[in-house]
Amino acid sequence: MFSALVLQLNVFHLSGLYRFENLTNISWQLGRSIMATTILFLVLLTVLYFAKISDLYSRGWMILWFALTAGGVAATRLIVSPAARWWIKEGHVARHVAIIGDGRAAERLANYLRSLRSVPIDLVGIFDDRLAPRDGASLPPVGTIDELCELAQSHEIDQIILAMPAISDKRLAGLLRRMRSLPVDVRLCRDVLDYCLPQSSYEFCGIVPLLRLYDKPVSGWAKIAKSVEDKVISGAALLLLSPLLLAIAALIKLDSRGPVFFRQQRYGFNNRVITVWKFRTMHHDQTDQHGARQVAENDPRVTRVGNVLRKWSLDELPQLINVLLGDMSIVGPRPHPLMCSIAGRLFNEVVEEYAARHRVKPGITGWAQVHGWYGAADTDDKIRQRVTHDLYYIDNWSIFLDLRILAMTIYVVLKRDSL
C-alpha cells in the first residue's frame, strides 16, 4: 500500500498535477489525472503479474479500484480548481517577478505579465543600472541591479526575467554571474536570442517563451520533503545520541576550563549569518570566533579531548540543534566562518562562484566531504574543489542523493581519521 502511494505521488508529480498554475484548468486537470491514474494502474498490474505475490487476482476488484481512484481524483480536482482560481484572484499565491531590461522589450513584457489572469504573477518592476527609460520606452526602471539582488536575497523575488535584446555577450555573461548566486529562478526572454532553440528548451509564461537559465535548487514539494527529512533525522538523532552527547559534555568539562559548547558565526542560506553550535575542542582563551586562522594538524590550541572529537567529527554533533531550528540541513555545503581566508584572501575572492553555494542551507555533511575534501582549506585548489563539489550537489539534489551522502558519511568517518 505504501509503495503504491509513493508511486502515485511520483506519477502525479511527473504529470504536472501538483503545479499550482495547472490547477486552474479544469479540462486539463481531468484529462491529465485520468491519464496518470491509467499509467499507475498499468504499472501496478505489471508489478503484481511479474512479482507473483498471489495467484488470485479479481478483475472485478481491479476495475473497481481503478474506477474509484480515477473518480476520486477527478472529483478532488473539480473541488480544488475553483479554490485555486479564488486564491489566485485574491493574490495569495502570486509569484513575485522582476524584469531586467531598459527598453521597449522589457516594457512590452511587463505590460503582458500585468494583463495575465490565468498565471498568478506580481510584477515587482523593471530593474536596470540605467535608470532612465530607453528605446522609446515610457516605463522607467524602479531600481538598479544591485537593489534587485538585495530584494532577491531578502526573499522578495521568486523569478527574474532578462529582456534586453540589444545586450552584449560580455554584459549578459556579467549578469549571469551575478544571478548565479541568487536563490531565484532566472529566465531569458526568447526575444533576446539571435537564434532559435528547440521548443523543448523553453517554458511558457502565458504565451511568452522563456529559456530556463537557473532554478531554485530546492523549491515546492522538494523543499517540503527536505524539511521533513531534516526534522525527522535531526530529532531522532538527538534523542538516540543524548547519552553520548552528555558523556562528551562531561569529558570536555573535566579536560579543560571553559564552556562545553563553542558558538561561531558562519554564512548560511542566502549569505545570511547564522550561529553554528559545536562542542568546544580548543582551550577557551584560544578559540577563534571569526575563523581567521584555520585549524592545522597538531594545532597546539586543540585540547586532548578536542583531538579525539575532531578525529571522529563528534564536535559537529551539536549542529543537529541548528538543523532542528531550521538554520542548517543534515546534508548540504559545509558552512564556513566569516573570515576564512587563504594567504590573506577571503574564499569569495579565491573562487568566483563561491557565493552560489549559499543558495541552499548549509549542512552537517556534504558531497565534498564524502569525496575527501574536508579539513583545512589552505590552498586555492582545496577550496575550488569544495565549491565544485558543493555546486554539483546543489544542481543535482534529490532525497536519494541525500541518503547516499549519509551512507557515505558513515563509511568515511569509520574509515578515515576525520570528516
Image (spheres, rainbow, N blue to C red):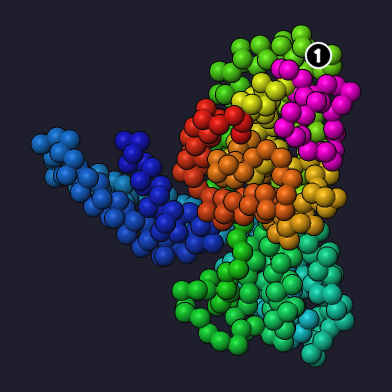
Q: Can you say which quadrant of the picture contains the C terminus?
A: top right
Q: Main secondary structure of the magenta part?
A: loop
Q: Please state the horizontal and vertical placement of residue 359, each as a whole percent of the image.
A: 67, 52
Q: Is residue 219 visible?
A: no
Residue type indicated by callout 1? Ser
Question: Which residue is tagged 1?
Answer: 256
Instruction: Farthest residue to the bottom: give it.
Output: 136
Task: Check residue 282 for magenta coloring.
Answer: yes
Q: Is residue 32 above or below residue 221?
A: below
Residues rendered magenta in the picture:
280-305
Number of labels in the image equals 1
The one of 169 and 158 positioned closer to us in this rendering? 169
Tell me the residue at 14%/35% (across/down). 54
Give the residue drawn at x 79%, y 86%.
137
Q: At 17% across and 35% down in the image, what residue appears?
A: 53
| Image quadrant where residue 320 sits | top right
Quarter-wise, where is residue 268 in the image?
A: top right
Q: Position of residue 280 (x, y in %)?
A: 77, 23
User: Label 1's element?
Assistant: loop
152 to 411, vertically: above or below: below
Left or right: where 80 falls relative to 268: left
Q: Nearer the viewer, residue 213 or 315?
A: 315
**Horizontal and vertical percent position of residue 385:** 63, 52
